[in-house]
Image (cartoon, rainbow, N blue to C red):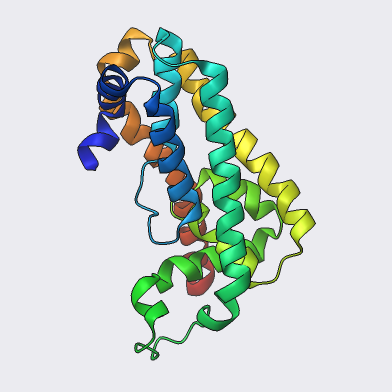
Amino acid sequence: MFDFLLHSDRHLLDLVRTYGSWVYGLLFAIVFAETGLVVTPFLPGDSLLFATGALCATGALDAPAALGLLALAAFTGNAVNYAVGRSVGPRVFVFNATDRSGFSHRLLNRAHLRRAHVFFEQYGGKAIILGRFVPIVRTFVPFVAGAAQMPTYPFVVYNFIGAAAWVSLCVGAGLLFGNVPIVKENFSLVTLGIVFVSLLPMVVQYLRHRMRGSA
């Protein structure tokens, strides 16, 4: 998985050569799972979209098809996550560190849930959009929104905007820069840079929290 993250452009190209148009289904499944299942926050997100854009620039993938399918995957993934959170969240979203007997405690990472809850509390509905650009948080925010009984219509609107913005920006960046020689030759470093930049909001928030706590 780590090798796929660092060299997603090369692995995707191999998959295109081997499976052809079936790759679109694989990309859809990965993005859907990364945004829609709280047990798979480790799947590649930003870097996968960037690599997809880079392959679109070479003609290996069709850009409109990739953009449309991946935006749909991101939208439906969040929608399913929200529905699950709305259905079962009130029963499992309990921040009780001593409760270690339930299935939810073993299945869900309480630290990630708590972080997403704080993110949602701070930014409200905008967290649906902003959370798209933060790894791990984007997997849990829709679940938290559902568990918090966020009204469906505002969630759908924010979800649509967030999915379109996230996919368009990441795939678009790959289209523009993915095949620039210096980027192509150092794709693993660029991937790490993308991950680092996407994690910056969490780091800044953590540092602010520590500073307020020590003040």
Q: Residue at x 46, y 21 (%)?
A: 53
User: Which residue ends up furthest to the left in the rendered image?
Assistant: 3
**Residue 118 appears in the rendering:** no
The picture quadrant where one finds residue 11 is top left
Position of residue 84 relative to residue 198, above or below, is below
Q: Which quarter of the figure has residue 212?
A: bottom right
Q: Position of residue 36 (x, y in %)?
A: 50, 53
Badge count: 0
* In the displayed structure image, the side of residue 111 where residue 145 appears, left or right: right
On the rendered structure, is 142 left or right of 23?
right
Q: Estimate the x, y position of residue 104 in percent, counting from the top left.
A: 42, 78
Please indicate whether residue 128 sits to the left or right of residue 156 in the image.
left
Judge whether 59 appears above or below 153 on screen: above
Residue drawn at x 37%, y 27% as measured from the top left: 23
Quarter in which the N terminus is drawn: top left
Residue 56 visible in the displayed image: yes
Examine the rendered structure and indicate whether residue 179 appears above or below residue 96: above
Image x and y of residue 151, in percent: 76, 64
Q: Position of residue 45 (x, y in %)?
A: 42, 40
Report the front residue among 111 and 13. 13
Q: Residue at x 44, y 61 (%)?
A: 38
